[in-house]
Image (cartoon, coloured by chain):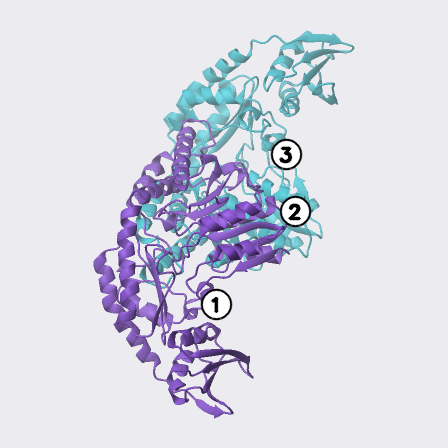
Chain colours: A cyan, B purple
Amino acid sequence: MSYFDAASGAPLHSVARQALLASLDEGWADPARLYREGRRARMLLDAAREAAAEAVGCRPDELSFTTSGTQAVHAGIAGVLAGRRRVGRHLIVSAVEHSSVLHSVEIQEREGGSVTRVTVDRSGAVDPAAYAEALRPDTALACLQSANHEVGTVQPVAEVAALCREAGVPLLVDAAQSLGWGPVEGDWSVLAASAHKWGGPAGVGLLVVRKGVRFAPQGPVDEREFGRVPGFVNLPGIVAAAASLRAVRAEADREAARLRELTERIRARVPELVPDVEVVGDPERRLPGIVTFSCLYVDGETLLHELDRAGFSVSSGSSCTSSTLTPSHVLKAMGVLSEGNVRVSLPLGAPEEDVERFLDVLPGAVAAVREKLGAPAPRTAVEEDALVVDALGKRCPIPVIELAKVIGDVPVGGLVRVLSDDEAARLDIPAWCEMRGQEYLGEEPADRGTAYLVRRVS
Amino acid sequence: MSYFDAASGAPLHSVARQALLASLDEGWADPARLYREGRRARMLLDAAREAAAEAVGCRPDELSFTTSGTQAVHAGIAGVLAGRRRVGRHLIVSAVEHSSVLHSVEIQEREGGSVTRVTVDRSGAVDPAAYAEALRPDTALACLQSANHEVGTVQPVAEVAALCREAGVPLLVDAAQSLGWGPVEGDWSVLAASAHKWGGPAGVGLLVVRKGVRFAPQGPVDEREFGRVPGFVNLPGIVAAAASLRAVRAEADREAARLRELTERIRARVPELVPDVEVVGDPERRLPGIVTFSCLYVDGETLLHELDRAGFSVSSGSSCTSSTLTPSHVLKAMGVLSEGNVRVSLPLGAPEEDVERFLDVLPGAVAAVREKLGAPAPRTAVEEDALVVDALGKRCPIPVIELAKVIGDVPVGGLVRVLSDDEAARLDIPAWCEMRGQEYLGEEPADRGTAYLVRRVS
């Protein structure tokens, strides 16, 4: 079995495992107590905090351990928004943040705050100028991920941080995907991260709040973790998290180069091996271990099952793999194809042979899914000026498959109108046009679903 | 070293350790993913939930794993208050709840809700009738611990639950101290608990919300844990928590009888071995492993250090051991002595020899502290009708020591006025009177601090 979903959660690093075992015996007592076991626990906690702070590049008293990266994001955003309430209630985020940021945004909107979502380009990167434009006198906080979790694109954090600093607005960086590779550059104010992304245990996150940032913890608090994270600390987890962060950093440069070569190989060879594929994400400014591509005419869930059967664990941003049946908001914001989407995120130490085997297996897996789906004959009708494809009631990728089947039936300059009630079509039909050099004319309301209008230009 | 502070946190149970180790290898992936590692993680999570639910006596889909008992309490209270907002904003708690409950209460008050704090008797127990009286048409929630964490007194949860049920008000039970011993009886609605209290790992709690309770999770949420606990689950911790709960339950009856005999020995012999001691908490309806006593004329922090040096780790509710220099709110609510307070809470398997050694060491430790503190000669003056003891600027237990020194200097029927600016005196002077059969007449404002009036009656 090859696990290629490290961006969801990495297997436990051997150093984390050792540290966890050692501190199960030494670190179970309450570090707030004054007796021997408590003092020993306090020493372990202090040492872990120093190690983590050094890796982040902050003061130990700026760093609190949380119970997850999600909790760090939620507490960080809520704390700054409350601390800067007098300034205003405007929040800036990128359109491709992690769901933990977006859930905080929903709360902020529900409570009457305003939110600007900064768009991204087709590579998934924000433009610092767009943050500069979004900054307002009542902006309480800006948020930007260090790198995207779905496509690996690295964001211009240092530039955005400088612009925010100039405007006197704190920048919160969700560094979950990148902290194992190195400290976040630039003059950020708040940072959140998650240990199980770098090979630490689940149940530990980091929240860093720079001195000078107005911060008012929300919800009930106690004296733990500088009043920022209530509840008894999970000390063995914290010790393991700090030890493994240090360990992965020690091997980061070499491993980054190795994984980058492997993901480059996937980026280059998948389009050669598989027809009708779009590799997404910035080809240069990207994380070493993540590569994402989308396959036309493929149902993501079936492809994941095929790959699972062949021994590969990957994830997908396709609508059919989401519980809400909507495509990933990241792919949507990038305007790229979401159907047949596959994210490969290599864990540390992923063997080259496994990647080669993946490249061997993938073309057959995609072909098998396409064959299965190729069957349904589109119901078409010529209606006024356009060929109409009725894909109502059919899920992604069927609407695009049917469009592709009939585009040759209209003359160059002719129109195809695709009727679909699947939300993913809104993303995938324009993306298909972009990929195949056809002209997407836009959508129109229809009796049922939506009509997507395409002009054949080649 | 004998660790006698299991009520703060128990050492990891061997079953928890084994389960944790096994699931570090099997349970690190995201249980929401569909590939092999994710399905394996999901199976572990489901099995842990079933085991925990069986131990609690609830349906698996009523039980969410949280990241601490504190988080369970916070989320439980906030969720019910929001879910029943239309009913009203009145909350009932006992005066001796855990700080996690009290911190939630503070938030509720700050946000305009009203709170009734039900008092306790001298044993620390609430009277169910007092809950019945406190119930109002706008009561959204009542909270009651299953047993007290400082003195071990078991609360009449089943009776209070029945009264609440009759009034249509949900009862939230903080079962942190008792869940390892057995399920909470009665018709409660919401339950919170903490794994590291029963020998599970830190970083895991339980939140149980019975079907039919109106519950609206607060703060940003995601799809994890039925939408009640956001963030990636700490699966190895959860598996270890569930396994150890089952394990401690299997040995609970036998171990409860054994520990009860040991704490009974401490309850009976401490007053024989140490003069001027008050054993607090209900002698019958109490947890098996907790016994608490307070020693007159002793400074709690110094006594803890003496006992630590002698190899015993215990805790104290004395003001001098708290960061805020106020005595424990539990002892205060009970109206018992807080000075020289010692809580012994025996972990599972605590050896009888250790308890005997503790009883050997304690008298000398108390005597040593008393000797150190016995020195200062009280400055007294006869003023109008009373002998005045000026203990201004002196910390607990000095005001009581000085009172005890001079009480013999006034005739029976005569008055002593103790001036003190230490908050603990408010609790400890009346408690001393109760213990020594003298009459406490009340307090009066003074130029500095407060004057406490005592009449010699014997």
Q: Earlier in the sequence, mark 3 or mark 2?
A: 2
The answer to which quarter of the image holds residue A259 is top left
Neighbourhood count class around disc 1 (C-alpha, 10 Å): few under 14, some 14–19, many 20 upward? few
Circle 3 or circle 1, nearest the eye: 1
Mark 1 belongs to which amino acid?
Thr
Circle 1 or circle 2, nearest the eye: 1
* Both marks 3 and 1 on one chain: no
Mark 1 and mark 2: Cα distance apart in space: 37 Å
Circle 3 or circle 2, nearest the eye: 2
Mark number for residue A91? Answer: 2
Mark 3 and mark 1: Cα distance apart in space: 53 Å
Q: What chain is tagged by disc 2?
A: A
- Where is A224 relative to B338, above or below? above
Mark 3 belongs to which amino acid?
Asp
Number of marks in picture: 3
Mark 3 and mark 2: Cα distance apart in space: 21 Å
In this orientation, which residue lies closer to the viewer: B365 or A166? B365
Which residue in the structure is indicated by mark 3?
A: A121
User: On the rendered image, what quadrant is the N terminus of chain A found in?
Assistant: top left
Assign a secondary structure to mark 1: loop
Name, please, the residue furthest toward the left.
B353
Q: Is residue A66 visible?
A: no
Neighbourhood count class around disc 3 (C-alpha, 10 Å): few under 14, some 14–19, many 20 upward? some
Instruction: Give the percent coordinates (x, y) of residue B316.
Output: 38, 65
* Both marks 1 and 2 on one chain: no
Q: Is residue A66 left or right of residue A413?
A: left
